[in-house]
Image (tube, rainbow, N blue to C red):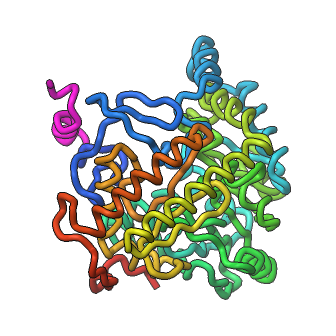
Amino acid sequence: MSDATTNAGLFERAQRRIPGGVNSPVRAFHSVGGTPYFVGRAEGAWVWDVEGRRYLDYVQSYGASILGHAHPKVVESVREAARAGTTYGAPTEGEVLLAEQLCERVPGLDMVRLVSSGTEATMSAVRLARGATGRTKVVKFAGCYHGHSDALLAAGGSGVADQGLADSAGVTAGAVADTVVAPYNRVPELDADVAVVVVEPVAANMGLVPPVPGFLEGLRAACDAAGALLCFDEVITGFRVGLGGASRRFGVQPDLWCFGKVIGGGLPLGAFGGRQVVMEQLAPLGPVYQAGTLSGNPLATAAGLAVLGELDAAAYTMLDGRAGELAAMLEAVVADAGLPVQVPRLGPLVGLFFSESPVADYDEARVAAENGIYRRFFRAMLDRGVALAPGPYEAVFPSLAHGRDDLERTADLAAAAAAEVGGGDGPEGEGLRRWKPLQPSPGALQPRP
């Protein structure tokens, strides 16, 4: 086969023109080894690489494809929108309709501003919070990833952790001088300089770590007492864990929200929003500037509206059920193979830790990630045609396209993969029959104080 039709050939060509051969670092497979597969097409629960091999896909664009790949209604909506033009640099009806849909579904969300990515949403929300409060400090939590803007990259989990990097070169001390990093699932003390507390209400970038009882309520109370704003980064949880996202599920209303992934229907789109009194600080009404040429892109809003139109209470009940079945089956078959395993679940979100005890924060997630089992299990699953995220800090994303047969197939293949990893039958050397937990390497991925 030619370079154009093999994964290895395309990866070699890509590395000549794209740093690392990829446009997002985790895709390079550094955490799991081997050559990344290049997707040729996708449909429903499946992706096919350029060599024609089919994979049962639990990446689903890191949660963006909640209906599954290439859903007919989404494809048709994008096709119809494209016939009228792809971008105008002017307002459209689609962005109004999408903004209305978001606000109708999320209690307390009065207004939204559409942007092009989750990173742009969180970056803009922080600027807005600082402008609205006149304060400077931002509090975030170790292991929570809020995109790659400088101020929020400290102890960022997910993509940063997957690369073995402590934050990022090029982020100056000044850029993070007003960023305070606290342990997840513990309510920090806030002073009068804190503008905003930014948190993933369900942490899904250090694996899946649900909030402990009282954590989100405690953050709300602490922000109220200090006069700070509370921002929920719902780029992953928004419209995935329920009709109104995590804030509605837990009954805790922040002052600001950030959304992405699901609301774009698989196209680049994000949003940030909040209470009217805060949002009206944005230009052209207020002094906080934010803009974007492609914000509210008509193809992305069409796709987002098509997805939201399919997400009713029945859809979430079905998705919750499938995630619950998947989590239970994975935990059972991996444990049966003698591997240490935790499979946390919150609604349609599933996690996978190779750990003997539940994981509650970034330090514990890091220990589980660094023992090397995920790498071997990932390779064994991929060899059997099941695609998990190529890094131990990501979540598992079942979609509405994953049927019962797919879940049972996954469990059967996971049993075989776990047996290979635990028994030493695989290509990466000796197995784990005498598994012992490994400690993190000294200084590796230590969160900033």
* Image coordinates for residue 207, horizontal then vertical, percent: 49, 66
Tell me if I can see residue 69 in this picture.
Answer: yes
Q: Nearer the viewer, residue 302 or 115?
A: 302
Residue drawn at x 84%, y 56% is 108
* Residue 31 horizontal side relative to residue 363, left or right: left
Count of all numbered marks drawn on residues in the image: 0
Residue 170 in view of the camera: no
Task: State which quadrant residue 139 falls in.
Answer: bottom right
Task: Report the quarter where the N terminus lies.
Answer: top left
- Residue ID at (59%, 11%): 83
**Up-down: is 267 above or below 122?**
above
Instruction: Give the image location of residue 411, x and y in percent.
Output: 47, 54
Query: For the view shown, which residue lies furthest in the top direction?
Result: 83
Q: Is residue 132 magenta?
A: no
**Main SS, magenta residues:** helix
Looking at the image, residue 48 lies above or below residue 338: above
Observer-nearest of 245 and 338: 338
Tell me where residue 126 appears, x and y as whole percent. Answer: 62, 62
Q: Quadrant of residue 77?
A: top right
Identify the residue shown where x is 40% and y is 59%: 415
User: With 142 as the anchor, is 302 left or right in this view?
Assistant: right
Give the residue displayed 30% in from the left and 44% down from the top.
22
Q: Position of residue 325 (x, y in %)?
A: 60, 55
Query: Would you say 94 lies left or right of 139 here?
Result: right
Of 240 and 217, nearer the camera is 240
Give the residues drawn in magenta, as a range: 1-18
Q: Quadrant of residue 219?
A: bottom right
Is residue 169 shown left or right of residue 334?
A: left
